[in-house]
């Protein structure tokens, strides 16, 4: 369990370094940021590995208590969701992934604060950089979303990559495909910064999921498209950097891990986001626009792609 | 402590008579060794300031909204071809060729102007005379002869003069360019590791050097701990290496920071050209160019830091880029550490020594006392425990005289020059 704490701390520190590097004299140092991003990914991997191991353990032990906990934390009835789960086609990863909240309650509150304050400060800085071509992003997002189920099912069904699949599924930003557990939906939504989704509650799981996914991916898209199109989006759900402070009736702890993972997803591609700012300004290459296209998809794919090298890598520390 | 005074590079010239230092403020200070005087034949020459000039100024790139630091990243001397000395100095973006020349005579007795430069009234000139060269106090002038600019998108980390004495290479994080010393408006790109999609970036170039006697060969090191040797005769773009040096990782020592500490911060060929040395965060490795699979020698610089990597990551010390150097005969190597310690390794006897560069421990004509870091258990007298090391006092830059046992050690903003004890 201490691995998770340590990993989380290292992630916070790494994010701070990446953020500070943007204001350092002499410009962004590519080498240092590359190394920091590698540490960040390693820490994330360990964190999620540790986290999901404990999730699996808890799931096996406390399956009966699961519904009760859900009830106590949410305003909604759980029977609906349980029913939904039962009818969902077998996706073993999804089941275990549906309980991010449980172990998250164990995480000490101070870790949450680190990430939250960082999220807010960074997202605030990020807002001013956002130039979105919302339409394009939305198209890519819908592509991405459509693609997700088959990819993930594929990943989940291969027995050898059980934990990977779980992580992949969870990391895919706010993907609500599969069981639309409120528990699962809720935390990333805050991270994605949709205050309005919070306020709306979970009347309609689908629309909530869409909004959250949109927000998250558009946020990632926007980071990449910063220096390209300047079309003002018809609506900008992305410009909600501040999380609704106490919108969640449940404790802040349970949002913690998913926030981090979503945040890390942004930063997984934010390294290149840093660089694309550096590069597109530096080189004015035509090739940059190629890179930016399909950014939404790249966000998801990249996370999945990058997970593979590290699945076998990190042993106990 | 003014950060502008922090020394960022140290380099002896080919004869060892001149020692150049660059600092964060963009200045270059050159020291010259005094000739041994006849009065005191056993007294070794001391190094005194010879010339000081501002090499680089801070610049602002308006297009990218980036400030370009004036810090001198590297200085490399050119072989001396006439009475003047030449060196290359570089910051993150621009390389400059400086000519340092002496003037010890001046012409006096001009017809049309006074000694102070004022023009003489033509009507008062009644005779012609020939100006005569008179001795004057030595004046050392530095003038920028070439400016090699706008060739690097990323930060320049290395420059290296080729053995043909006509070309040199410059390396940034992703590219290496080849220049001709006479031509400033273009260079050839010989290595480009920038991926088409920057999101796939996994490694950067950290150092590069030309082979000391094969003018077609150079090496470059990466942040992944690998070294590639390239032959410029093979292709115009040396993206495919001729040799690839990598030591397999020890899986038992993996940690969050394995990747960072394996990043190579410096690579140097031996004078013979048969070996090369690489420095990563915790060790120095000597490689035989004929064997790519692993180094032939590995020296631990400060292994006791391995358990402190997390703290060193937090305070950014883990990103410190230590350099290393060979002595003139390639029998010894030297590199720096923390607490103003530096380490020397004798390759033949396998003995190593830790010395300290500080005012307290270096009295003029005094002998340096070996230091020892206590890694655990009882601390003996004169030993220093790992926790009392001062990580702000780091020795990143050291240089060894090409022929004699004279070393230059840069400790933050101070330069220490140590010589072998005379019998």
Image: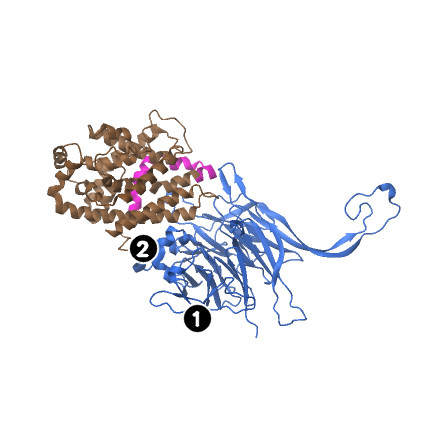
Tell me if residue A208 is in the magenta stretch. Answer: no
Q: Which residue is mark 1?
A: B351
First of labels 1, 2 by sequence position: 2
Magenta-drawn segment:
A278-307
Residue placed most toward the observer, B316 or A188? B316
Q: Is residue A300 on the magenta stretch? A: yes
Q: Quadrant of the C terminus of chain A?
A: bottom left
User: Where does the image place residue B392, in percent across and percent down from the top left?
Assistant: 44, 55
**Which hue is chain B drawn in?**
blue
Q: Residue furthest bottom?
A: B423
Q: Are marks 1 and 2 in contact (CB under 8 Å)?
A: no
**Residue B169 placement, left or right of A21:** right
Please say whether residue A188 is visible from this viewpoint. yes
- In this rendering, the answer to whether A143 lies above or below A158 is above
Distance from label 1 to label 2 (Cα)? 30 Å
Rendered location of residue B293, percent (x, y): 38, 61
What is the crowding at mark 2: few (fewer than 14 residues within 10 Å), some, or many (at least 20)? many
The residue beneath circle 2 is: B255
Chain A shade: brown
Which residue occupies the extreme right position in the image?
Answer: B126
Which chain is indicated by disc 1?
B
Q: Residue at x 14, y 36 (%)?
A: A71
């Amino acid at each position: 369990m201490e691995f998770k704490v340590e990993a989380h701390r290292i992630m916070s520190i790494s994010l701070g370094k990446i953020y500070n590097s943007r204001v350092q004299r002499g410009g962004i140092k590519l080498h240092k940021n590359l190394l920091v991003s590698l540490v960040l990914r390693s820490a994330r991997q360990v964190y999620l590995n540790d986290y999901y191991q404990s999730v699996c353990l808890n799931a096996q032990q406390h399956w009966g208590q699961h519904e009760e906990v859900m009830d106590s934390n949410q305003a909604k009835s759980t029977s609906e969701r349980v029913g939904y789960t039962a009818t969902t086609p077998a996706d073993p990863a999804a089941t275990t992934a549906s309980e991010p909240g449980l172990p998250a309650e164990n995480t000490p509150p101070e870790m949450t604060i680190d990430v939250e304050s960082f999220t807010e400060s960074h997202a605030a800085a990020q807002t001013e950089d956002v130039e979105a071509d919302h339409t394009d992003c939305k198209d890519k997002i819908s592509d991405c979303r459509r693609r997700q189920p088959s990819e993930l099912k594929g990943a989940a069904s291969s027995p050898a990559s059980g934990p990977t699949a779980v992580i992949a599924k969870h990391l895919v930003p706010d993907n609500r495909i599969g069981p639309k557990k409120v528990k699962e939906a809720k935390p990333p939504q805050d991270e994605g910064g949709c205050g309005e989704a919070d306020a709306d509650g979970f009347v309609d799981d689908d629309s909530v999921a869409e909004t959250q996914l949109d927000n998250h991916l558009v946020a990632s898209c926007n980071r990449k498209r910063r220096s390209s199109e300047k079309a003002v989006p018809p609506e900008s759900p992305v410009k909600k950097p501040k999380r609704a402070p106490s919108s969640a009736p449940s404790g802040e702890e349970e949002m913690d891990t998913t926030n981090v993972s979503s945040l890390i997803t942004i930063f997984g591609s934010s390294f290149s986001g840093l660089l694309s700012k550096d590069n597109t300004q530096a080189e004015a290459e035509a090739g940059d626009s190629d890179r930016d296209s399909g950014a939404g998809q790249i966000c998801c794919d990249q996370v999945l792609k990058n997970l593979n090298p590290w699945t076998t890598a990190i042993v106990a520390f | 402590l003014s950060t502008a005074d922090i020394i960022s590079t140290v380099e002896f010239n080919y004869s060892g008579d001149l020692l150049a230092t660059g600092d964060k403020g963009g200045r270059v200070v050159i020291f010259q060794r005094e000739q041994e005087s006849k009065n005191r034949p056993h007294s070794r020459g001391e190094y005194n300031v010879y010339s000081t000039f501002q090499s680089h100024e801070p610049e602002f790139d308006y297009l990218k909204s980036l400030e370009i630091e004036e810090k001198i990243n590297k200085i490399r001397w050119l072989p001396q071809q006439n009475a003047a000395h030449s060196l290359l100095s570089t910051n993150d973006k621009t390389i400059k060729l400086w000519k340092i020349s002496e003037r010890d005579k001046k012409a006096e007795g001009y017809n049309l102007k006074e000694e102070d430069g004022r023009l003489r009234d033509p009507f008062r000139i009644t005779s012609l005379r020939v100006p005569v060269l008179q001795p004057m106090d030595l004046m050392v002038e530095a003038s920028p002869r070439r400016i090699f600019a706008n060739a690097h998108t990323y930060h320049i980390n290395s420059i290296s003069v080729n053995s043909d004495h006509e070309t040199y290479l410059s390396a940034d994080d992703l590219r290496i360019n080849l220049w001709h010393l006479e031509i400033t408006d273009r260079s050839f790109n010989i290595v480009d590791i920038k991926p088409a999609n920057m999101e796939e970036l996994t490694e950067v170039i950290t150092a590069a050097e030309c082979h000391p006697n094969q003018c077609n060969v150079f090496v470059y090191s990466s942040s992944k701990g690998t070294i590639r040797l390239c032959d410029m005769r093979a292709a115009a773009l040396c993206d495919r290496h001729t040799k690839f040096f990598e030591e397999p990782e020890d899986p038992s020592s993996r940690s969050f920071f394995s990747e960072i500490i394996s990043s190579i911060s410096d690579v140097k060929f031996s004078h013979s050209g048969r070996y090369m040395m690489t420095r990563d965060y915790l060790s120095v490795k000597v490689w035989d160019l004929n064997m790519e699979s692993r180094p032939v020698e590995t020296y631990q610089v400060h292994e006791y830091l391995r358990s402190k990597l997390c703290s060193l990551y937090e305070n950014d010390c883990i990103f410190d880029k230590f350099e290393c150097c060979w002595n003139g005969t390639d029998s010894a190597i030297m590199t720096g550490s923390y607490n103003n310690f530096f380490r020397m390794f004798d390759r033949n006897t396998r003995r190593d020594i830790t010395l300290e560069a500080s005012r307290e421990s270096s009295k003029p004509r005094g002998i340096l006392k070996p230091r020892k870091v206590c890694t655990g258990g009882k601390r003996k007298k004169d030993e220093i425990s790992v926790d009392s090391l001062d990580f702000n006092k780091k020795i990143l830059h050291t240089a060894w005289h090409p022929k004699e046992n004279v070393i230059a050690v840069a400790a933050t903003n101070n330069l220490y020059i140590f010589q072998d004890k005379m019998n």
